[in-house]
Image: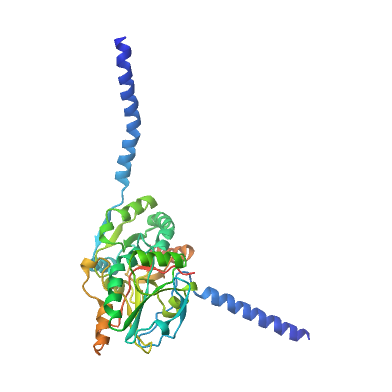
Amino acid sequence: MKTRNLSILLASLFVIAGAVFAAGARAEGEVPAPAAIGSTIEDFTLPDVDNKDRSLKSLAGKNGTVLIFIAVQCPVSNAYNERMAKLAEDYQAKGIAIIGINSNVAEDAAAVKAHAAEHKLAFPILKDPGNKIADRLGASVTPEAYFIDPNNKLLYHGRIDNARNPAQIETSDLRNALDAALGGKTIEKTEAKAFGCTIKRA
Amino acid sequence: MRFTKAIVPITLCILLMTLAAPAQKYKARAAKQRAVVSPIDTEALKGLLTQQRERPLLVNFWATFCDPCRDEFPDLVKIDKDYRPRSLDFVTVSLDDMTDIKTTVPQFLDAMKATMPAYLLNASDPEPAINLVDKRWQGDLPATFLYNEKGEVVYKHIGRVNTAELRAAIEKVVSKKGEGQ
């Protein structure tokens, strides 16, 4: 009986130690590895700015979907507001949906809604409580884009273009990827490092 | 009576000069202390990071818009003060916009009383610079790298630094240098 109790105690300690180790394994500021190009992004459901649940499936475009991690207060993300609005305008007409995701813990749905209205971001924006989707996709900054095909296969990951300052744009990597996919061509550059503000995780 | 009339403006002048003097002194001191931020392009950054040097080099990539960067800065200033006399070079590279080079960036450095050499990445496309530093680094800030005298990375941390961990890494390179002498 004593041996059995000891075994239970040891097993419990092992489980607790494992949980503690798992919690501590992710160092502060460490972001999970980004989803690999070609991998499938599983469907997910997140609340929109009106706290209404929306699934990726219900918002997806017939020719693909772009998920962009955005922020309310980040000056880099804000430098892209007009470009994101234009992107949505240009590509939603071509069957590619644009979805914004805000994973910043300090920016609530009301702030995200007001910001979208102020900057005329006419595409759905979802809140990502607990940054679960940012973790799943390995998103680290804002703005950071993921382009998936109609079967949720990841085709492009990274920046929208090379420059925060629109006068210095040399390569519109995201648009190039979307145009290639729409034209049935191979996407030449499938990854380009996104630069911006670190996502403020919970 | 004439003397009494004259004494009022004279007293006022003296009072004004007395009040103005410290303000001017403060202004002069503030101007003197103002941090100078130099632009650095990708090639120059490559030279800075890969060259052989006499002292280990700590490089912190940051930006004024980055909360954890601002948060960790006082710790970094303290590290600079503690280890510069012990043969550590420390430079900061801001990834702010070039338009911030004479405004928000030096203002922040002044507020932090930071005196290490400060650069701002002058590149319309930051990706080559990010890849040059570390191919696995996604460009998220802050990012801190410690190079030994051969230009090899001996410590790196993406995100807010763990001060104890960084100090331990620095101790290894500075003490090694000390032992070799």
In this picture the colour scheme is: rainbow
Q: Quadrant of residue A5?
A: bottom right
Vertical position of residue A55 compared to residue A27: above or below: below
Q: Position of residue A100 (x, y in %)?
A: 38, 74
Q: Quadrant of residue B83?
A: bottom left
Would residue B60 be visible to someone looking at this image?
no
In the depicted view, which residue is nearer to us: B89 or A172? A172
Q: What residue sits 34% from the left and 80% below the top?
A: A97
Q: Position of residue B2 (x, y in %)?
A: 29, 10
Would residue B53 be visible to someone looking at this image?
yes
Q: Residue furthest top?
A: B1
All told, the count of numbered labels is: 0
In the depicted view, which residue is nearer to us: B17 or B179? B17
Q: Position of residue A64 (x, y in %)?
A: 33, 85
In the depicted view, which residue is nearer to us: B83 or B14? B14
Vertical position of residue B164 compared to residue B3: above or below: below
Q: What residue sits 77% from the left and 84% below the top?
A: A2
Q: Position of residue A32 (x, y in %)?
A: 44, 77
Position of B84 compared to A178: left or right?
right
Q: What residue sits 31% from the left and 53% below the top?
A: B106
Q: Residue furthest right?
A: A1
User: Looking at the figure, which quarter contains the N terminus of chain A?
Assistant: bottom right
